[in-house]
Amino acid sequence: VTLTVKDESGLTGFDSSSGYSSSGYNSGGYSSSGYNSGGYLGELGFTSPDGNQQIWVGLNTADRIDGDQFSGTYQVNLNLQDTHQPGLWSLHALDLEDDADNDLEIETQSGGWGSPLSDAGRQHMAARLGLDPSALSFTYDNPDFDPATSQPDHTPPQLTQFSINEVTS
């Protein structure tokens, strides 16, 4: 996945006129803080064709392949495995945060976990980002996929022991 991110001087924070939902921290003015010191840049979430699988990938400043801290191109790999469903995977969530803690968070509004992302949902996400819808999806060819062995694990972890010990000095 390759994306270009700009953090040049401009109004930070929430802009309801743009048609997307975002939240801003320290959004009281102009900022050109960039993505340099903290390491963490954000994350991307992709959903499978049937909506039952998701892949999340973190973005870090070390992933920058071109540009500088204010206008850079970043590249990360998605860890797709034989258990991931073949077909059209789509971006369903994006979270970016600059050094001044200005945050851009966009998520699709689908029918919930396990619901596929519709063409309209992909188009809406693309419009909110000002991109072509085809730029937000990819086709995963996985001839080894076996639906019988690729079911998601919905069993929560079990807490088998918990204790609080008083420390005396």
Image (cartoon, helix red, strand yellow):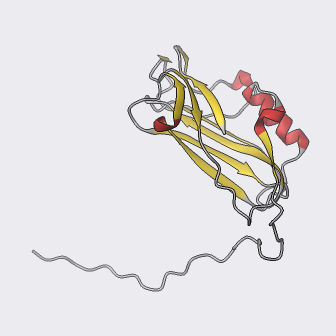
Residue 151 appears left or right of 68: right
Q: Residue at x 47, y 86 (%)?
A: 160
Q: Residue at x 60, y 39 (%)?
A: 95
Which image quarter is the C terminus in? bottom left
Residue 53 at what x, y percent from top left? 74, 60
37 or 169, which lies in front? 37
Residue 121 at what x, y percent from top left? 84, 41
Task: Give above or below for 23 relative to 57.
Answer: above
Find the residue positioned furthest to the right. Answer: 119
Which image quarter is the N terminus in? top right
Residue 101 at what x, y percent from top left? 46, 33
14 or 72, which lies in front? 72
Find the residue positioned furthest to the bottom. Answer: 160
Residue 142 appears left or right of 72: right
Q: Quadrant of residue 125?
A: top right
Task: Give above or below for 156 relative to 73.
Answer: below
Q: Quadrant of residue 119?
A: top right
Q: Residue at x 53, y 16 (%)?
A: 8
Task: Give above or below for 32 relative to 169.
Answer: above
81 or 95, which lies in front? 81
Q: Residue at x 68, y 44 (%)?
A: 93
Find the residue positioned furthest to the front. Answer: 143
Q: Quadrant of residue 100?
A: top left
Residue 145 at what x, y percent from top left? 81, 66
